[in-house]
Image (cartoon, rainbow, N blue to C red):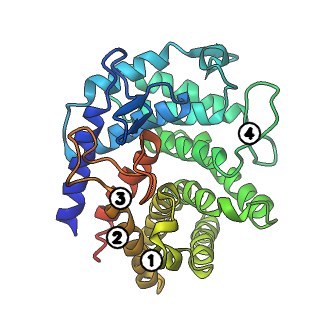
Amino acid sequence: MDKILKERLAFIYEWYKGMVNEETGRLVYIYSPSTDSVVANGSPIRDIGAIWDMEILSGFLDRKELEPVIERSLNYYSRYLLRRNGYVILDPKLLDEPSGIAHNAFMTLSLLHSRLPDKEEKALLLADGILAQQRPDGSFKIYFGAERDDGLDFYPGEAMLALLEMYKMTKIKKYLESAEQGFVYYKTRYYERKKVRSGLLIFFANWQSQFCRLLYTYTQKEELRRQVKDYVFQLHDRIIERNDYGKVKRYPEKQVSVEVACALEGLNDAYAIALQEMDDRRERYQGSLCISLTYLLSLQCVKRCTDRQRGGFGFSLSDRTQRIDITGHFVNGLIKSFYNEITC
C-alpha cells in the first residue's frame, strides 16, 4: 500500500506542475479535462491553502520543482498584508472579499512551511491577528470587519490548527492556551449543543480533528488531553455509525469526492490517536479508511488521460473536473494514510 500511495502522490506532484498559469506563475483554480480549459481566478483562501498543500507534498516527496511557484505565490499574497494594532490581516480591498481568520490561518500555515527568510516574523503577526479575534468565552469572531459570523463549521478549526502549528515552531504559550480555550468552546457550546448541521459534520470533524491531534500532542493538561481524545473519537464514531462509509462502498456513483477526502483526512487523525491509545477502534477506523482510499484512488486519472489531466482527481465518478482546493484534501489524506501505515 505504501508503494501505491507514494506513486499516486508523485502523480499529483506532476499534476501541480501542469496547473501553473503561464501568465501569473501561480496555480489555476479549476481544470476541465472535457474542454481542456482552465479557470484562473479562484478565491484567495483556496489559492493560499493550495500553497500549503504544495509545501506538504514537496516535503513528503523531497522535491523542489514547485519551489518557484510556492515562493512566487507567497510573495504575491504577502503584498496583501495590512498592519493593524500590532498584528496583520489580509487587506479586504485587495482580496475583494471580507478578510477573516481563515485567510490569516492559511497564510500562517503556508509561511511556516515555506523557505522564505522572514517567514516567522510575518507568521507571528498573522497568528496574533487570529488571537485578536478570540472572545472571552473562547469562540472566534470570524471577520475583521463588521460582517456577521459564518463558516463556523470550518474557520475556527483552521484557525486553531494554525495557532498550534505556530506553537509547535515557537513554543510561545499564548497560541497553545488560545487553542485550549477554543477547544472547550467548540466542543461544549457548539458541537454538544447540536449546532453542527448534519450535512457539514464531515467537514467540521475534519478541521476539528486536525487541530485536536496537535492539541492532544502538546497540551500539558491531562484532563483536557483525555477530553480531546474522547471528542475526536465521538465525532468519527458518529460518522461511521450513520453509515457514511457504507454508502461510499455501496453507492460510489452517488458520492462527491471532497466529502470522502475530508473524511479521510480527519479519520486519519483520529486513527493516529487511537494507535497511541491502543484503542479498540483501530480496526474499525482502518476499515473505513480503506473504503475512502479505494474510492478516491479510483477517481485519480493515471491511465488513458492527457498529460495535463494525469494525476488529478475528478469531482465525482461522472464529473471529471479537477480543482486545486479539493486536491489538497487528497494530498493530506494520502500522506496521513502513508504515515499511519494503512494497509488495505
- The kind of residue tagged 4 is Gln
The three-letter code of the residue at mark 3 reads Leu
Residue linked to disc 1: 249
Q: Nearer the viewer, residue 146 or 89?
A: 146
Pointer 4 or 3: first along the chain: 4
Label ID, residue 299: 3
From the image, state whether disc 4 or disc 2 is nearer to you.
2
Circle 4 or circle 3, nearest the eye: 3
Q: Which residue is mark 4?
A: 134
Q: Residues within 10 Å of mark 1 (few under 14, many from 20)?
A: some
How crowded pointer 3 is (Cα within 10 Å; few <14, some 14-19, many 20+) is rated as many
**How many numbered markers are drawn?**
4
Q: Earlier in the sequence, mark 1 or mark 3?
A: 1
Q: Residue at x 35, y 58 (%)?
A: 299
Can residue 177 be seen by looking at this rendering? yes
- Camera-side residue: 184 or 281? 281
The type of residue carrying mark 2 is Thr
1 or 2: tag closer to the N-terminus: 1
